């Protein structure tokens, strides 16, 4: 596959290169990927995974997979296992560097006590609403809590009481004592610990107080020996707090936080909250529904790890958030599957065609290439007989000009087979077409010496009716009809009613009877398809369309981008 990545190293790699050359962190490079186990990873997380694991590998270091399991209310082991599957599927390995923030709960508690001893933290009995209101705005300074000047001894005892479960949820929190007048709202006495009287998936009922993300994240980085804490741009305003923790606590390592831009993908949503809404409201069948932008969904749809990594490489690493056309991602998988996917014949909406001058009991096995540009993939035999099936929309009784498929009195070539001519049309009592009656020219068999003498403009695909294999085919398309869903109306009103079309009577060439779950094929003239592991427990073939052969949404995306840029 052609490499279309931006030339030269990105700004993060230049920083790391400089640090290594200067001997910073003793020349080590260690990163981490710290997901919250409260949902499935989406395509935006794939960028963070590729950056963190990729940079660590390039510089001979390691990347920790660390679960930020600090909010047991929303976490589940299902998400932990799904995240590990996704990271492995993308081609990355954390080796012995699997960790959880909960591994550090005892140390984090000690760090909190240390801040109290320094007079840098206090227990606040204000309500959550009172804390929010007293924090001020972007233009107005916050106001001190009435509990801000409690003594060290009182705060130590109150924090210990919080840990013993003597207060109820929401009754009090532990806050850092920094600067309520800071222009950075994140430094206005942020909450460090809150009370959650729920069982934790790993620590059980050992703790009833849990650290906030900024506190746990920073100190987990420092305890693990992270050298470069690479995170998305939304945490840029949190960096002063990150550095404040490192400055005021006796940590073994001092990581450097570096932020990179996120990206938004057109015709989908990237908010975990909105993705959960789609699942909870049954707009989709689950987190791995092939219409979702989750990594699990892309895997189930038939995307390859190579195509996802190629996409991440193409969009690059910058400091500016950007909007990416979904067509770019689809083009990455198109290019990948064009090179690797074997070709097969499949008729999705069958129409019977009878070749009247072909012997009734005869059959031929015609040679068909598995790939037009890769002779090393060999050939296969495709059966041909008197009765075949073609696509219903490959025939028109009253066609427009420049319709080069089958029509009354018209001729087309059958792929790998013969030229046929439509002689007559058979209809039922309602006037619906039930079959096409044709004749064939025996001298036009593909590959024969006489075949090049006859030329027709149209070629269509087909399968032998007697030999065909039945399958269910699911045609997936974009989940939303608007390029920027969720921006105004509710998600439900913007859903694409044609995002899934299930075809239960598709007929395939017989070689596909042995197709295994996880295999990928190009159905000629149709698109790229992936063999689904049928979840209904039935012995049937199910194919998911990964992507069409051509991008039918490109014009819509270009217009939407032009509108966003003001023309």
Image (spheres, grey):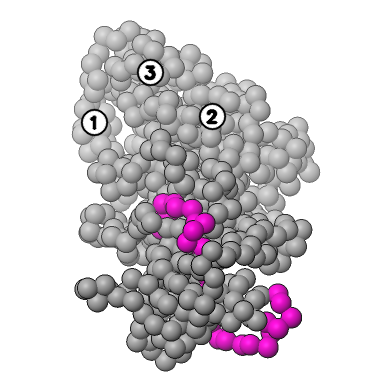
Q: Which mark is residue 200?
A: 3
Residue for point 70% across, 83% down: 450
Residue 464 falls inside the magenta stretch: yes
For mark 1, what is the residue?
Answer: 128
Residue 192 falls inside the magenta stretch: no
Tell me where residue 423 appears, x and y as whole percent.
43, 84
Image quadrant of residue 451? Answer: bottom right
Q: Residue furthest bottom?
A: 401
- For marks 2 and 3, the one nearer the N-term is 2
Nearest the eye: 26 or 492: 492
Residue for point 47% across, 61% down: 465
Tell me where residue 73 appears, x and y as whole percent.
32, 26
Spatial CA distance of label 2 from label 3 is 16 Å
Nearest the eye: 193 or 478: 478
Spatial CA distance of label 1 from label 2 is 29 Å
Label 1 or label 2, whichever lies nearer to me, is: 2
- Quadrant containing the N terminus in the rendered view: bottom right
Q: Is residue 43 visible?
A: no
- For marks 1 and 3, the one nearer the N-term is 1
- For marks 1 and 2, the one nearer the N-term is 2
Q: Is residue 286 visible?
A: yes
For mark 2, what is the residue?
Answer: 66
Tell me where residue 146 appears, x and y as whole percent.
24, 25
Residue for point 53% across, 43% down: 517
Which span is picked out in magenta?
447-476
Nearest the eye: 462 or 319: 462
Q: Viewed as shown, does residue 59 lie left or right of 182? A: right
Image quadrant of residue 367? Answer: bottom right
Q: Residues within 10 Å of mark 1 (few under 14, many from 20)?
A: few
Q: Which mark is residue 210?
A: none
Q: Are marks 1 and 2 in contact (CB under 8 Å)?
A: no
């Amino acid at each position: 596959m052609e490499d279309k990545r931006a030339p030269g190293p990105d700004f993060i790699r230049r920083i790391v290169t400089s640090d290594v050359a200067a001997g910073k962190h003793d020349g080590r490079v260690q990163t981490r990927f710290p997901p919250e186990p409260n949902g499935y990873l989406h395509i935006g997380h794939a960028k963070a995974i590729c950056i963190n694991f990729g940079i660590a590998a390039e510089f001979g270091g390691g990347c920790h997979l660390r679960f930020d399991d600090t909010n047991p209310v929303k976490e589940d082991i299902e998400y932990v296992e799904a995240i590990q599957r996704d990271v492995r599927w993308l081609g990355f390995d954390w080796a012995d560097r699997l960790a959880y923030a909960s591994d550090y709960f005892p140390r984090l508690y000690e760090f909190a006590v240390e801040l109290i001893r320094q007079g840098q933290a206090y227990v606040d009995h204000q309500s959550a609403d009172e804390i929010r209101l007293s924090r001020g705005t972007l233009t107005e300074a916050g106001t001190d809590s009435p509990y801000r000047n409690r003594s060290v001894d009182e705060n130590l005892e109150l924090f210990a009481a919080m840990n013993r479960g003597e207060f109820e949820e929401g009754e009090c929190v532990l806050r850092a004592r920094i600067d309520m007048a800071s222009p950075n709202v994140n430094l206005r006495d942020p909450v460090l610990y809150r009370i959650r009287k729920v069982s934790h998936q790993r620590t059980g009922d050992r703790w009833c107080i849990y650290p906030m993300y900024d506190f746990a994240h920073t100190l987990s980085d420092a305890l693990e020996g992270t050298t470069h804490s690479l995170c998305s741009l939304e945490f840029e305003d949190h960096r002063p707090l990150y550095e404040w923790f490192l400055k005021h606590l006796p940590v073994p390592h001092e990581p450097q936080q570096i932020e990179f831009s996120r990206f938004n993908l057109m015709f989908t949503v990237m908010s975990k909250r909105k993705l959960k809404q789609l699942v909870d409201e049954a707009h989709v069948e689950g987190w791995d529904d092939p219409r979702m932008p989750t990594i699990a969904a892309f895997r189930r749809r038939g995307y390859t790890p190579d195509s996802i990594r190629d996409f991440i490489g193409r969009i690059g690493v910058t400091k500016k958030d950007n909007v990416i056309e979904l067509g770019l991602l689809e083009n990455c998988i198109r290019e990948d599957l064009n090179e690797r996917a074997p070709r097969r014949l499949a008729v999705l909406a069958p129409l019977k065609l009878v070749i009247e001058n072909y012997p009734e009991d005869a059959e031929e096995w015609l040679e068909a290439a598995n790939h037009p540009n890769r002779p090393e993939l060999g050939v296969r035999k495709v059966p041909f007989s008197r009765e075949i099936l073609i696509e219903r929309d490959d025939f028109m009784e009253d066609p427009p000009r420049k319709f080069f498929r089958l029509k009354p009195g018209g001729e087309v070539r059958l792929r790998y087979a013969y030229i046929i001519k439509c002689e007559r049309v058979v209809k039922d009592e309602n006037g619906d077409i039930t079959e096409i009656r044709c004749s064939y020219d025996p001298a036009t068999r593909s590959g024969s010496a006489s075949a090049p003498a006859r030329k027709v403009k149209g070629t269509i695909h087909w399968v032998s009716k007697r030999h065909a294999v039945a399958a269910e085919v699911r045609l997936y398309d974009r989940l939303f009809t608007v390029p920027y869903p969720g921006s105004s109306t509710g998600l439900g009103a913007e859903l694409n009613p044609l995002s899934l079309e299930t075809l239960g009577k598709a007929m395939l060439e017989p070689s596909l009877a042995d197709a295994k779950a996880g295999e990928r094929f190009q159905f000629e003239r149709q698109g790229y398809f992936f063999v689904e592991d049928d979840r209904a427990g039935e012995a049937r073939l199910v194919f998911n369309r990964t992507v069409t052969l051509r991008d039918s949404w490109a014009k819509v995306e270009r217009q939407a981008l032009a509108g966003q840029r003001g023309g």
